[in-house]
C-alpha cells in the first residue's frame, strides 16, 4: 500500500481512481490509512462479497489475497496482478498508461 | 597433463520463490469487472462515510483495485 501511495501522483495523472480493498472494518482501515499516510480511499469488504466475486477469497484464512485489478472506463478488466507481484504497482501503472494512450488514439 | 575439466556446479541454483499462494482469480483480462458498492475511509461533506460504487466510474475513469491484507501488508 505504501508503494501505491508513493506512486499515486503517477496514477492520478493518468485519469485513474485508485482504491485499496480489504476485508477489514472501516475504523481499522482508517487507522491503517492514517499510519501509512494513504490518501486514496480504502474500501471495507467486511461481508467478503467482493473478494469472493473476484475469486481471491482465502477460505482458510478468511481474508482476501493480495491482487491488483485495472479496470478501464468501459468496466472491462485490462490487467491483473496476483500474489507478491501485486505489491509492486509498476504493472498496474503501466496498464494505466496503456489505457490513457489508447484513449488518445482516435 | 589434461586441463581441468569443466565441472557442473554440484548444487542446483536456489529457488528464491516459495510462495504457495492458494486462490487464484477466475476473472480474466477482457471480462467485465464485477460491480460492487462498499463503504470507504473517506468522510463526505455531510460527515458520513462515503460509499463507492464501481459502475459509477464507467465512462469516467479507469479504476485500480488494490486488494490487500491488512495484517500482512508490507508493500
Image: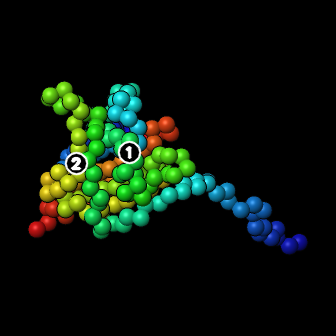
Front residue of A93/A55: it is A55
Q: Residue at x 37, y 57 (%)?
A: A53
Q: Nearer the viewer, mark 1 or mark 2?
A: 1
Q: Chain of mark 2?
A: B
Front residue of A16/B11: it is A16
Q: Which disc, if any, is residue B36?
A: none
Q: Residue at x 26, y 47 (%)?
A: B37
- The image quarter containing residue A54 is bottom left
Position of residue A45 relative to residue A39, above or below, is below
In the shown orientation, is residue B27 left or right of residue B57? Answer: right
Position of residue B35 relative to residue A11, above or below, is below
Q: Which residue is mark 1?
A: A47
Element marked by disc 2:
strand
- The image quarter containing residue B9 is bottom right
Position of residue B14 relative to residue A45, above or below, is below
Colour basis: rainbow
Q: Which residue is mark 2?
A: B53
Front residue of B2/B24: it is B24
Front residue of B22/B16: it is B22
Element marked by disc 1:
loop
The location of residue A10, given as percent across then percent down, is 26, 45
The location of residue A81, given as percent across then percent down, is 41, 57
Question: Is residue A36 among what the camera can see?
Answer: no
Position of residue B39 relative to residue A82, above or below, is above
Q: Quadrant for the N terminus of chain A, please.
A: top left
Q: Are marks 1 and 2 in contact (CB under 8 Å)?
A: no
Q: Marks 1/2: CA distance? A: 15 Å
Q: Are marks 1 and 2 on the same chain?
A: no
The location of residue A25, given as percent across then percent down, is 38, 35
Mark 1, residues whose alpha carbon is within 10 Å: few (<14), some, or many (≥20)? few
Q: Residue at x 89, y 72 (%)?
A: B1
Amino acid at each position: 500500500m505504501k508503494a501505491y501511495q508513493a506512486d499515486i501522483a503517477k496514477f492520478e495523472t493518468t485519469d485513474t481512481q485508485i482504491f485499496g480493498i480489504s476485508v477489514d472494518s472501516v475504523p481499522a482501515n482508517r487507522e491503517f490509512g492514517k499510519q501509512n499516510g494513504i490518501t486514496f480511499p480504502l474500501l471495507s469488504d467486511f461481508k467478503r462479497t467482493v473478494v469472493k466475486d473476484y475469486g481471491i477469497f482465502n477460505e482458510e484464512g478468511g481474508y482476501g489475497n493480495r491482487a491488483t485489478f485495472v479496470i478501464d472506463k468501459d468496466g472491462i478488466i485490462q490487467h491483473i496482478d496476483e500474489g507478491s507481484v501485486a505489491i509492486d504497482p509498476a504493472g498496474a501503472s503501466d496498464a494505466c498508461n496503456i489505457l490513457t494512450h489508447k484513449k488518445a488514439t482516435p | 597433463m589434461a586441463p581441468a575439466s569443466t565441472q557442473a556446479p554440484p548444487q542446483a541454483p536456489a529457488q528464491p520463490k516459495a510462495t504457495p499462494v492458494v486462490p487464484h482469480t477466475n476473472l480474466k483480462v477482457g471480462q467485465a469487472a464485477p460491480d460492487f458498492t462498499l463503504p470507504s475511509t473517506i468522510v463526505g461533506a455531510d460527515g458520513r462515510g462515503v460509499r463507492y460504487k464501481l459502475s459509477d466510474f464507467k465512462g469516467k475513469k479507469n479504476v485500480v483495485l488494490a486488494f490487500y491484507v491488512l495484517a500482512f501488508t508490507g508493500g
